[in-house]
Image (spheres, rainbow, N blue to C red):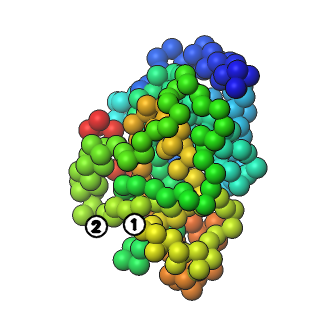
Amino acid sequence: MNNYMEKMKKTEKFIREKITNIPKIAIILGSGLGSLADEIENKTILEYKDIPNFPISTVAGHKGELIFGTLENIPIIAMNGRFHYYEGYDLKETTYPIRIFKLLGVETLILTNAAGGINETFKKGDLMIITDQLSFFAESVLRGPNMDEFGERFIDMSSAYDKEYIEKLKEAMMEVKDDYQTGVYAYMKGPTYETPAEIRALRTLGADAVGMSTVPEAVVAHHSGIKCAGITCITNMAAGVTNEILTHEDVKETALKAEDNFKKVVKNFIKKI
């Protein structure tokens, strides 16, 4: 664990040498939602490959850049590309940037993702505010020795997604469109899409959408005392809800169609926090 802290301190030092004023808000851009990066002004871009000890994004639609700049004149950090367990990284690696954000002084994390719709009232292109999460079928990112420097061994997860932020997201959504969704996001390890039987099980457990990211990041952020907000773009209907063959290309295509509303919601939200 000391070695892990040493690696993080090296990463922190590198970033602080490049960036003089570190923003308090960080955004992780999910699959197909990276175009928000084009809206950021006064940019300084650090490529993941150049940041000491940073993982590298390997998935199409995840560019691999840490962007410092302003959005609506508000200073932010944007991760244009995230890391997934299914890429071969362990969970401490997939959430490494969240720990770095905490060391840098980030206070708010906006998590975005593309996901499959389980709730049969949803449709492709919907935006869903994440109100809670499920991760029964994956190991905990906090497994192993506790990192006391960040948080306690046992943490209450009843407000993993900040309740005040959920209300502010609703306001931000209403300013863009009046048919937004709210719901529970279920995390599966991937990279396979879920079977119809798995989707039926997740629906029984209360899930509204399912994806392969976000939950480990939310857990580590919550453990570190960072407040979280979550936005899901429903890019496809899950197996069994539809007879369509699920492909990553379709996910990216639907996210592209929803990107204008998505960008407006994020901009509205950051002005409210």
Identify the residue at horizontal 67%, vertical 61% (top origin): 190
Location of residue 12 with respect to 99 vertically, above or below: above
* Residue 70 found in image quarter: top left
Q: Amino acid at mark 1?
A: Asp
Q: Is residue 117 visible?
A: no
Residues tagged 1 and 2 counted as in contact (Cβ below 8 A): yes
Give coordinates of residue 42: x percent, y percent: 47, 27
Q: Is residue 122 visible?
A: yes
Location of residue 62 with respect to 255 vertically, above or below: above
The residue pinned by badge 2 equals 179
Q: Left or right: 127 with respect to 15? A: left
The residue pinned by badge 1 equals 126
Question: Disc 2 on helix, strand or loop?
Answer: loop
Identify the residue at horizontal 57%, vertical 53% (top origin): 213
Q: Specify few, some or many for label 1: CA neighbours under 10 Å numbering under 14, 14-19, or 20 or more.
A: many
Q: Left or right: 115 with respect to 55? A: left
Give coordinates of residue 203: x percent, y percent: 46, 73
Identify the residue at horizontal 63%, vertical 41% (top origin): 143
Label 1 or label 2, whichever comes before in sequence order: 1
Give coordinates of residue 80: x percent, y percent: 57, 42
Q: Amino acid at mark 2?
A: Asp
The residues bearing labels 1 and 2 have C-alpha atoms spaced at a distance of 8 Å
Identity of the residue furthest to the bottom in this view: 243
Query: In the rendered image, which quarter contains the N terminus?
Result: top right
Identify the residue at horizontal 34%, vertical 50% (top origin): 265
Q: Specify few, some or many for label 2: CA neighbours under 10 Å numbering under 14, 14-19, or 20 or more.
A: few
Front residue (pair 255, 214): 214
